[in-house]
Every structure is written in C-alpha cells, then in structure tokens.
Amino acid sequence: MKGVNYRESRGMPYVRREYIAGKPQIKIARFSSGQAKNDYDYKVELLTTEKMQIRHNALEAARLAANKTMAKAGETTFFSTLKVYPHVFLRENKMIATAGADRLQEGMRRAFGKATGLAARIRPGQPIFEAYVTAANLNLAKDGFKVASSKLGCPAVLRITPLKEQMLESED
C-alpha cells in the first residue's frame, strides 16, 4: 500500500471506530516535544498549500525529522506541537495477485475493504506543525521544518511570527 493512493481525499471521511473490528493503531508517539515556557521569541508554522490527506506514518516521520534537527541546540530550547490528528480510516480491498488469478480478479463493486491505516485531512493554509523558538535557534527551526516538509509529500510553506516586540535602541 502506497501513500500516493490515499493522498487525494475522495468522498466522505470514514471515522466510525465502533464498526471496524481490527482498528489500526496510531503511529504518532508524541504530539508535543520540548519545553513549554513563555519566553520564546518566534513562532514558526509549517502550512500546506493544497487540500489533501497525510498518512499517520508520514506525520510521525516529519515530526521526528523536525525535532531531531531542532534538538541539536538542546531539548529545552524549543517547543513544538503537531496540530493535526489522523482520524480518517484508510481502507483497502485487497485483491488476489498471484499467478493464475486472472479469472478471480473481478472483485465486488464498491467493496468496503479492510482498515489499513489512518490519515489526517488537511485544508490549504492549515498549520501542520508549530514550533516556538528563541532568536538564536530560528535557523535550526527553519532547517528542521524544511526537512519535515520533504517527508509529507505535499507542498508546504513556512510562516514565522515574532512573539515579542523587537527592542530597537536608538543612538543619541
């Protein structure tokens, strides 16, 4: 099963857990990392530019890549959160793919399929990741989100918001 098959969101999302016997487990280990405090200088967000679905293992890979890059300065120098939750079930109707199965490959029309994974539906301009960093670690956060955007499989842009008013010292 490839992620490219589930990138486009078709139809209504299927989220009813009570009707699925073998529910897939979410692969995201933690939704927030680092140290939450109030003295950060910048908020860096990773935004998508297209409407799509992102699988839970792609979100986890992107989160790990971003946090690994930002943690080079230390675990207490940033605070990052994953802003989306993968709640849509991805289903696959597996067909027989062995030799001599050409007559058995008709299948059923609109078959329900077996749940194989989870995905998050993303709107254009919606933040996926959010990180709070100090001014000294802003470039590390940019690099981390650049690596994370390559793991997602969709075009993404950065938005940097200063949290504190920069003190401009005028010389007399």
Image (cartoon, rainbow, N blue to C red):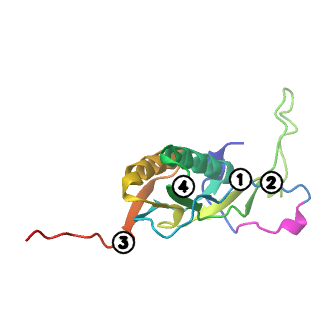
State whether residue 48 appears in this view: no
- Answer with mark 4 or mark 1, whichever residue precedes in sequence: 1
Give the residue number, with chain letter if any, for mark 4. 76
Instruction: Give the crowd class for mark 2: few <14, some 14-19, many >=20 residues within 10 Å.
Output: few
In the picture, measured across the screen, residue 125 lies left or right of residue 92, that is left
- The three-letter amino acid code for the residue at tag 4 is Thr
Residue pictured at 67% horizontal, 66% vertical: 11
Give the residue number, with chain letter if any, for mark 2. 25
Query: What's the mark number on residue 164?
Result: 3
| Furthest residue in direction right, as rendered | 21
Q: Nearer the viewer, residue 22 or 165?
A: 165
In the picture, measured across the screen, residue 36 lies left or right of residue 144, that is right
Give the image location of residue 144, x and y in percent: 48, 48
Q: Secondary structure at mark 1?
A: loop
Q: Nearer the viewer, residue 124 or 33?
A: 33
Q: Secondary structure at mark 4?
A: loop
Give the residue number, with chain letter if any, for mark 1. 29
Task: Confirm or deny contact between disc 3 and disc 4 (CB under 8 A).
Answer: no
- Answer with mark 3 or mark 1, whichever residue precedes in sequence: 1
